[in-house]
Image (spheres, rainbow, N blue to C red):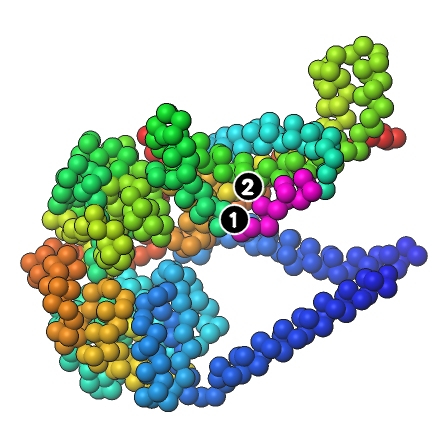
């Protein structure tokens, strides 16, 4: 039986070898090539200059902000969702926007946030007056949160759904305030959902590109933007690959830090 | 399990039908057969009626594909997967293609209509003697401004963009050569400068521009300028022409310090299978009537002297898009600076982009 089961793994291992391992090996290989295609460490030297280090830090900072706001909005939303009557309908409404192409959504936001757009008309109507919304840090974080928030809500929702309500009742019966119940019972038991939500948001947020140009007008430069430029414009594949290597390392670290170790006998 | 099998069978059937239909469609479009001409051009850069007309006159079936950057086009032709017979790269890309042996020489005897081209656009630095390329359209890089938004100011030079009154009013095109070239020109240097000290000065100069820059964007710049998101844009003349017809507050100027002049020429890539048809097509496009019709549709400046005479008077005499010789003499073509220098330009441009307000 054990043997036949191993056979089942063959298609998947081929897949992994071709589309996961081989590309990573290629990325690492290219990162050691200079513009002329010779072996060198010049790309790595360049990465450790202030330009790229600043870029790395700012990518992390924006990804952190995006994750933080997604969590701050996503957790209460997921919590409320579990209490609503038509859960499936609400969930569908949250998932629905992810079916629409990212580029279309970004263009829609250009329209909404532009000087004469709907957002500014509203601001003017309530007496605040026009503000520059497009091409600011605010619009970048806002749109990113909008794009990623379904990926934060879903795992948290699943975690809260699985939570046994009698634990909450028990805590309340024993005199814990609602805040204490949340802090000591609900949150620790749903932390796995929060972790996977954060992974699903933080990691893609690190390598965002497109919307850095469309929504932030290249006022925000992330590692993703830099990779795109190196490959498509400069055609310096080596440098692009080097940045990608650091991105892969960063992602691996994040995955390791937030990995959920299954405790023996733990039932949630 | 039974349902799952049913589902799989259904998906399999539908995919099969789609595949079959696709094959039939391709067959009726005449992908097979010898008399086919594969054209690879920028999007929306030819009057589709001319393709029909060419097909009727020559009996050659045209397959038309588009690209959106010289780099994308180069990559595809280098890989050689598709047999393009005609491509329309810009000046520096042509130099690169010649250098890398990606183009076939053009037999000028087979293109009698070459006599219609203004000699100003022949024998240029990127292709001396026009051995490999024939002019298609040309244009400049300049400033689009919206008088309503910048208090009736009329910028005439690159230096005017550094005016503190223009805070947060400028949109730049997302191109290292364009933006660095602008800064170099404003300092009185050549936009093909390779001297490190001058390049660093140009970068420092750009940093000073930061407070005025609202955003650095791609093709959206047309939409944003037409919708009055900002008062000033640094754009290609063709884009300017297009949005000026949408918003009448807009005007275009070629800065007096000089700027970039670019040429999109027709080449025959090494991958070509129908070299004879390609020559026929080039000759067809250079016919005065056809070139005029094409210029009318596309809106860019035509290098075809005979065709220019057929255009409307107000188009032909518009100095913004057909500048006099004394203006064009101040303009420079982007030279192929080599990979190393191009990477350096992009590096400096990146530092400018990362510079916070």
Q: Identify the image quadrant of residue A10.
A: bottom right
Question: Would residue A172 be found to the left or right of residue A222 on screen?
Answer: right
A146 relative to B212 in the view: left or right: right
Q: Which residue is mark 1?
A: A102
Looking at the image, residue A175 sits to the left or right of residue A132; the answer is: right
Asked if the magenta segment contains residue B350, the reply would be: no
Instruction: Decide which of A239, B333 is in the foreground and name it.
Output: B333
Question: Which of the two labelled residues, at mark 2 and mark 1, occupies the earlier sequence position?
Answer: 1
Disc 2 + disc 1, Cβ < 8 Å: yes
Q: Quadrant of residue B240?
A: bottom left
- Disc 2 target residue: A147
Q: Residue furthest left?
A: B326
Instruction: Depth check: give the residue in front, B113 or A83.
Output: A83
Mark 1 crowd level (few <14, some 14–19, many ≥20, 10 Å Cα) = some
Q: Chain of mark 1?
A: A
The residue range painted magenta reads A89-101
The rendered magenta stretch, by its main secondary structure, is classed as helix
| Element class at badge 2 | helix
| Element type where label 1 sits in the image | helix
- The residue located at (38%, 86%) in the rendering is B60
């Amino acid at each position: 039986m054990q043997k036949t089961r191993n056979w089942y793994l063959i298609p998947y291992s081929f897949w992994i070898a071709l589309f996961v391992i081989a590309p990573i090996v290629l990325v690492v290989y290219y990162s050691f090539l200079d513009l002329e295609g010779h072996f060198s460490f010049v790309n790595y030297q360049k990465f450790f200059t202030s330009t790229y280090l600043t870029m790395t830090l700012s990518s992390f900072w924006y990804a952190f902000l995006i994750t933080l706001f997604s969590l701050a909005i996503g957790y209460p939303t997921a919590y409320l969702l579990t209490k609503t009557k038509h859960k499936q309908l609400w969930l569908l409404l949250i998932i629905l926007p992810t079916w629409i192409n990212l580029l279309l959504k970004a263009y829609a936001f250009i329209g909404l946030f532009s000087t004469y757009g709907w957002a500014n008309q509203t601001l003017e109507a309530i007496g605040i007056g026009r503000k520059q919304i497009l091409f600011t840090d605010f619009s970048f974080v806002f749109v990113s949160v909008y794009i990623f928030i379904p990926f934060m809500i879903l795992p948290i929702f699943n975690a809260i759904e699985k939570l046994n309500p009698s634990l909450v009742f028990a805590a309340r019966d024993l005199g814990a305030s609602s805040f204490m119940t949340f802090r000591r019972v609900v949150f620790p038991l749903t932390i796995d959902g929060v972790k996977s939500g954060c992974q699903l948001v933080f990691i893609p947020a690190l390598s965002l590109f497109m919307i850095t140009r469309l929504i932030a007008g290249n006022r925000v430069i992330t590692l993703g933007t830099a990779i795109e430029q190196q490959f498509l414009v400069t055609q310096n594949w080596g440098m692009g690959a080097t940045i990608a290597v650091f991105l892969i390392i960063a992602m691996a670290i994040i995955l390791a830090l937030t990995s959920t170790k299954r405790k023996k006998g733990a039932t949630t | 399990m039974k349902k799952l099998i049913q589902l799989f069978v259904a998906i399999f059937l539908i995919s099969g039908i789609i595949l079959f239909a696709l094959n039939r469609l391709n067959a009726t479009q005449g992908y097979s057969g010898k008399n086919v001409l594969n054209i690879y051009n920028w999007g929306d850069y030819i009057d589709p009626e001319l393709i029909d007309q060419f097909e009727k006159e020559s009996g050659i079936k045209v397959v038309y594909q588009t690209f959106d950057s010289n780099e994308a086009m180069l990559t595809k032709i280098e890989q050689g997967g598709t047999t393009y017979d005609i491509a329309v790269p810009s000046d520096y890309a042509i130099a690169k293609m010649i250098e890398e042996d990606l183009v076939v020489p053009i037999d000028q005897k087979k293109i009698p209509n070459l006599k219609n081209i203004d000699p100003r656009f022949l024998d240029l630095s990127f292709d001396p003697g026009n051995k490999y390329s024939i002019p298609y359209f040309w244009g400049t890089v300049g400033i689009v401004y919206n008088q309503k938004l910048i208090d009736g100011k009329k910028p005439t030079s690159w230096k005017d963009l550094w005016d503190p009154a223009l805070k947060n009013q400028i949109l730049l095109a997302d191109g290292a050569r364009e933006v660095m070239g602008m800064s170099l020109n404003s300092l009185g240097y050549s936009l093909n400068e390779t001297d490190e000290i001058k390049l660093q000065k140009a970068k420092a100069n750009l940093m000073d521009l930061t407070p005025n820059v609202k955003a650095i964007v791609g093709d959206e710049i047309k939409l944003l300028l037409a919708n009055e998101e900002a008062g000033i844009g640094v754009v290609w003349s063709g884009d300017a022409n297009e949005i000026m017809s949408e918003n009448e507050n807009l005007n275009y100027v070629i800065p007096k310090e000089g700027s970039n002049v670019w040429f999109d020429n027709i080449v025959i890539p090494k991958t070509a299978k129908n070299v004879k048809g390609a020559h026929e097509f080039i000759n067809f496009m250079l016919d005065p009537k056809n070139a005029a019709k094409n210029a009318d549709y596309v809106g860019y400046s035509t290098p075809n002297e005979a065709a220019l005479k057929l255009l409307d008077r107000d188009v032909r005499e518009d100095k913004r898009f057909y500048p006099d010789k004394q203006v064009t003499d101040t303009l420079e073509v982007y030279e192929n600076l080599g990979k190393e220098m191009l990477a350096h330009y992009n590096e400096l441009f990146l530092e400018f982009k990362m510079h916070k307000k």
